[in-house]
């Protein structure tokens, strides 16, 4: 598809990966699901829509010229707004904000009103944060009925189920953040609520930690648990015991994270309107109840220039981009259609925007600075300080023409002489997810996930993708080869590779080369100059200990971060095993690793189950009490159904022999609907795959709990993308696939 463009319009430089992400998630589609918009048309659609806000303030403004400036800002990949703006600007839905916080009141009406509001927001493409701290604890008396309250965790299940049913823009499920104050009587249940890894999978969870709790922790003392309904002390807990459990669960599952509520509210720009109780799903945007925020990110790789043969940051060009981006985001507030009237009033009353960055790790590569060095942290602080200063200046400039935000008198700025702001906040380090893939740069302030990786496309071609900065350095210094890049993709690091010059090995570090302390110190360097908060994940190796997690949480509090999220490699439940080629000798129980042939005799079982397509016979062969292969036969159904049933059995067998746990297979098959559902003993059977899941579940789950197959020895755990099968990263509070753009928060 081609369109006419002005002579001054930039030519879009898109990688195949960028184009795939745009087509899958952002470009308009017709009624048949076919893409009917080019990337250029998308940027023009967005630019034209956002520029329309100019006429609200100056009837003489050249709207077309401003739209052209906004187009070039995006098409040159100097700046991109949050995903809902790219998806919805200039279209019928028109909802442009990314993150929302909703109140959850202590009543059935209030709770289900929040469920409804969350569904509306998810449908529009936004993510939601909730504080469940106002809900009375489990086993409290319910005055109106004389019944017993079920507590906040049980109600979180309702929100999770609603999220499961509502897809954003028809493509993916929404994301949620659940926060519970550390002094809520149900805090221990909350800390453990994702313990079995099967529930609340549409939630990130964080404990709202207070200064009082941290003081009790330092003293080894108990602290009060406060009933939110009566505001009286309900009981007391030892702070150390609670912290131990928090650390243990974070180490085991990656949840919960921590948000420091008092630190967040020390920087509340509008304290006259109340306290901030929660954040958006990835933790970077603390908000008041019924508040939303419009976010965008500047691509730092576009601001590195050469001066006397040395790479330097072009601050003059960066300043120009910051001021234009602030104007763009302020316009976005006016041009968005908000899902609820109360949200519209709060957003337009405070006019919060969140301008952040992406491409920081790539910029460090370009400057020849290792991510885990003091120089890198100094550069991060310097860049963010400049962004903070100039975004405030841009907001003040807009206030001179457009006026201050309506709730200015409730803000901290009313006491500051000469500080008239258009926006209550201007800076946020948000997840850039698919945006950084589109722009062809690293995510947010995260270190590079990989310098090289292999991507498998639809026709099974394997394409080698190399970090563009590393690619340029390798070619210019003469050591590039496809074979070397493939080796780097396999190993994930260059630090010990003798084929790469030592000085480059020290510069081109990736996420797992970096010590956890460097992760959190980098986060703190940016937080120091950020109005809102910083979305970042502290990646820990699989062998990290609970003490390592405790150290990170302690350091985050000490360095005045507003929150912290950790991910220990291999701790999530969506693990698939990948052969490393190293490790101890496998034992005879593990055929895949040992390379042994299938035994001639295997014991197992056969079960008949009724389906809408006839009687299904499922036979499972076992080795050491774990499923090894599965055969499925459907009677009197026709050749097509028989063939498909056999194929399902073969694929399940392949999964079992590849080390995939049986509960993963169950979860993938369970609930798939077919043409004819039937009732039989044990419940409704929806389809042949659902029937197979029921047979496996009866055999391999005890009282609803999964029976895990033993992981083969000599293999490393790797997180794989559910859409394309490539390695997946945990960054910015989310799962993110650099190969296909898949993201999931929660």
Image (cartoon, rainbow, N blue to C red):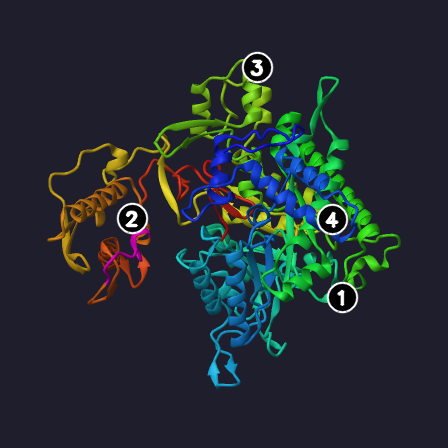
**Circles 4, 3 touching at the beta carbon (< 8 Å):** no
Marked residue nearer the N-terminal end (4 or 3): 4
Q: Position of residue 231 (x, y in %)?
A: 63, 76
Left or right of residue 357, residue 127 in this image: left
Q: Which residue is mark 3?
A: 477
In the rendering, which numbered label is found on residue 433? none
- What's the CA distance linking mark 2 and mark 4? 61 Å
Q: Is residue 321 shown above or below 707? A: above
Left or right of residue 80, residue 384 in this image: right
- What's the CA distance linking mark 3 and mark 2? 48 Å
Q: Which residue is mark 1?
A: 272
Mark 3 closeness class: few <14, some 14–19, many ≥20 residues within 10 Å = few
Q: Nearer the viewer, residue 168 or 704?
A: 168
- What's the CA distance linking mark 2 and mark 1? 55 Å
Marked residue nearer the N-terminal end (1 or 4): 4
Marked residue nearer the N-terminal end (2 or 1): 1
Q: Nearer the viewer, mark 4 or mark 3?
A: 4
- What's the CA distance linking mark 4 and mark 3? 49 Å
Main secondary-structure element of the magenta-colored stretch:
loop
Q: Nearer the viewer, residue 226 or 354?
A: 354
What residue range appears in magenta?
A: 668-677
Q: Is residue 13 magenta?
A: no
Q: Which residue is mark 4?
A: 54
Q: Nearer the viewer, mark 3 or mark 2?
A: 3
Mark 4 closeness class: few <14, some 14–19, many ≥20 residues within 10 Å = some
Mark 2 closeness class: few <14, some 14–19, many ≥20 residues within 10 Å = some
- What's the CA distance linking mark 3 and mark 1? 59 Å
Count of picture labels: 4
Mark 1 closeness class: few <14, some 14–19, many ≥20 residues within 10 Å = few
Q: Which residue is mark 2?
A: 709
Marked residue nearer the N-terminal end (3 or 2): 3
């Amino acid at each position: 598809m081609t369109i006419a463009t002005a002579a001054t319009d930039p030519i879009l430089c898109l990688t195949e990966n960028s184009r795939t992400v745009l087509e899958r998630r952002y470009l308009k589609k017709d009624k048949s699901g076919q893409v009917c918009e080019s990337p250029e048309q998308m940027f023009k659609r967005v630019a034209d829509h956002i520029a329309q806000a100019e006429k609200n303030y100056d009837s003489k403004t050249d709207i077309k010229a401003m739209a052209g400036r906004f187009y070039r800002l995006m098409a040159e990949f100097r700046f991109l707004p949050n995903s809902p703006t790219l998806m919805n600007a200039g279209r019928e839905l028109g909802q442009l904000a990314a993150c929302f916080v909703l109140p959850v009141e202590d009543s059935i009406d209030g709770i289900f009103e929040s469920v409804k509001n969350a569904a509306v927001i998810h449908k529009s493409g936004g993510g939601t944060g909730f504080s469940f701290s106002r809900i009375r604890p489990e086993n409290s008396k319910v005055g109106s009925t004389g019944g017993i309250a079920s507590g906040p965790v049980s109600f979180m299940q309702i929100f999770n189920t609603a999220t499961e049913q509502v897809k954003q823009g028809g493509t993916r499920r929404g994301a949620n953040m659940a926060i519970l104050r550390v002094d809520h009587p149900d805090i221990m249940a909350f800390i453990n609520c994702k313990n079995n890894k099967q529930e609340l999978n549409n939630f990130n969870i964080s404990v709202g930690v207070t200064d009082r709790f941290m003081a009790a922790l330092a003293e080894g003392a108990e602290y009060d648990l406060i009933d939110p309904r009566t505001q009286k002390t309900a009981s007391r807990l030892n702070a150390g015991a609670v912290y131990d459990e928090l650390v243990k669960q974070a180490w085991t599952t990656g949840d919960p994270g921590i948000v420091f509520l008092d630190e967040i509210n020390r920087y509340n720009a509008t304290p006259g309107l109340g306290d901030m109780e929660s954040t958006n799903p990835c933790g970077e945007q603390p908000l008041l109840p019924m508040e939303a925020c419009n976010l965008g990110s500047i691509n730092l790789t576009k601001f590195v220039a050469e001066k006397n043969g040395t790479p330097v940051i072009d601050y003059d060009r960066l300043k120009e981009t910051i001021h234009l981006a602030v104007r763009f985001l302020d316009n976005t507030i006016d041009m968005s259609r908000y899902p609820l009237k109360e949200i519209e009033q709060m957003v337009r009353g405070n006019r919060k925007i969140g301008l952040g960055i992406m491409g920081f790790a790539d910029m460090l590569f370009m400057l020849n600075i290792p991510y885990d060095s003091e120089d890198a942290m100094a550069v991060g602080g310097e860049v963010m300080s400049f962004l903070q200063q100039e975004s405030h200046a841009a907001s003040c400039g807009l206030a001179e023409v457009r006026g201050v935000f309506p709730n200015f008198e409730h803000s901290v700025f009313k006491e500051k002489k000469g500080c008239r702001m258009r926006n209550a906040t201007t800076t946020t380090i948000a997840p850039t997810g698919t945006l950084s893939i589109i722009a062809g740069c690293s995510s947010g302030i995260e270190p590079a996930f990989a310098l090289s990786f292999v991507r498998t496309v639809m026709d099974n071609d394997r394409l080698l993708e190399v970090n563009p900065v590393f690619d340029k350095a390798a070619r210019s210094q003469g050591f590039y080869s496809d074979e070397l890049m493939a080796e780097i993709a396999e190993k994930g690091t260059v630090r010990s590779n003798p084929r790469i010059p030592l000085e480059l090995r020290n510069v081109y570090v990736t996420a797992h080369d970096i010590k956890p302390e460097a992760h959190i110190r980098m986060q703190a360097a940016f937080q120091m100059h950020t109005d809102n908060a910083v979305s970042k994940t502290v990646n820990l190796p699989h062998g990290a200990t609970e003490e390592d997690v405790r150290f990170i949480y302690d350091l985050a509090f000490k360095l005045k971060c507003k929150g912290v999220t950790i991910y220990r490699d291999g701790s999530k439940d969506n693990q698939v095993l990948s052969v490393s080629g190293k490790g101890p000798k496998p034992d005879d129980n593990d055929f895949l690793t040992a390379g042994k042939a299938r035994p001639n005799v295997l014991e197992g079982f056969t079960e008949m189950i009724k389906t809408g397509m006839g009687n299904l016979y499922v036979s499972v062969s076992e080795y050491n009490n774990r499923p090894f292969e599965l055969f499925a036969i459907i009677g009197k159904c026709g050749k097509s159904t028989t063939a498909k049933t056999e194929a399902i059995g073969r694929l399940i067998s392949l999964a079992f022999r590849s080390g995939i746990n049986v509960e993963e297979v169950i979860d993938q098959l369970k609930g798939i609907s077919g043409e004819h559902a039937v009732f039989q003993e044990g419940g409704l059977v929806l389809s042949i795959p659902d029937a197979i899941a029921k047979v496996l579940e009866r055999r391999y789950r005890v009282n609803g709990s999964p029976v895990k197959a033993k992981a083969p020895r000599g293999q490393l755990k790797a997180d794989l993308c559910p859409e394309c099968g490539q390695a997946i990263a945990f960054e910015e509070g989310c799962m993110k696939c650099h190969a296909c753009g898949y993201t999931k928060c929660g």
